[in-house]
Amino acid sequence: MNHDSNDTQAVKLTGEEVAKHDSKDSCWVIIHGRAYDVTEFMPEHPGGPKVILKYAGKDATEEYAPIHPPDTLDKFLDKSKHLGEVDMNTVEQEEKADDPDEIERQKRIETMPILEQCYNLMDFEAVAKRVMRKTAWAYYSSGADDEIVGSSLVLKRSSFDTNTGASIDDARKPLCLPQNLVPSSNPTRCREH
């Protein structure tokens, strides 16, 4: 996994070393205490290169973690681009202004119901929508991680003929209605559509 212990590498990279790679020509980011060279990956990034460049040479964990599954870097970034552990004590910390939205979100987290109070998916969704960061909620609620694309998702109309028990799964087959729903002026139960 990409966020293993930060104590296994003999010589850790420094924040100063990573900070030198802060452009589109050489772009390194720190995620979970590890450095990654994402220079060649930027054009392929689904969110575009701009968001990666915003964190070039810096710690991107806070922005990255809520919207990426833990194994994303292992899956999509060549191992040669996994540069190693970073001594996080040497990474320059940016001063952040208080974000009123984040303060309110933290208050909602403090008052969210316990797990046993969530009985169904709608309960979980309601809590998640209230306590997740907006970017994380947008990502997960869009199903962006389901990896179903284009025509690989095939939807079919499925109906059931109550008189014969036959299933009709192909839209080109006749649509059959139960006998009690067929108008008496039309003795045939099946019609082409």
Image (cartoon, rainbow, N blue to C red):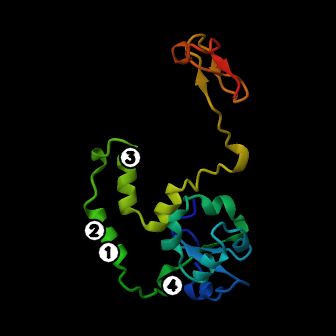
Left of 64 or right of it: where is 128?
left
Task: Name the N-terminal-most of marks 3 and 4.
Answer: 4
Q: Which residue is mark 3?
A: 122
For label 3, the SS is helix
Q: Which residue is mark 1?
A: 103
Vertically, is 122 above or below 159?
Answer: below
The quadrant of the image that shows the N terminus is: bottom right
Calculate the distance from the C-alpha at mark 1 to the C-alpha at mark 4: 25 Å
Calculate the distance from the C-alpha at mark 2 to the C-alpha at mark 1: 6 Å
Res. 107 mark: 2
Calculate the distance from the C-alpha at mark 3 to the C-alpha at mark 4: 41 Å
Vertically, is 97 above or below 188?
Answer: below
Amino acid type, residue under disc 1 in the picture: Ile
Q: Which residue is mark 4?
A: 91
Mark 3 Cα-neighbour bin, 10 Å: few <14, some 14–19, many ≥20: few
Do the numbered discs 2 and 3 sit on residues whose CB atoms are within 8 Å?
Answer: no
Calculate the distance from the C-alpha at mark 2 to the C-alpha at mark 4: 29 Å
**Residue 101 seen:** yes
Vertically, is 78 above or below 193?
Answer: below
Do the numbered discs 2 and 1 sit on residues whose CB atoms are within 8 Å?
Answer: yes
Calculate the distance from the C-alpha at mark 3 to the C-alpha at mark 1: 25 Å
Amino acid type, residue under disc 3 in the picture: Met
Task: Name the N-terminal-most of marks 3 and 1.
Answer: 1
Mark 2 Cα-neighbour bin, 10 Å: few <14, some 14–19, many ≥20: few
Place of residue 125 in the rendered image (x, y in percent of width and height, measured from the top left): 40, 51
Place of residue 57 in the rendered image (x, y in percent of width and height, measured from the top left): 60, 84
Calculate the distance from the C-alpha at mark 2 to the C-alpha at mark 3: 21 Å
Say which of marks 3 and 1 sits in front: 3
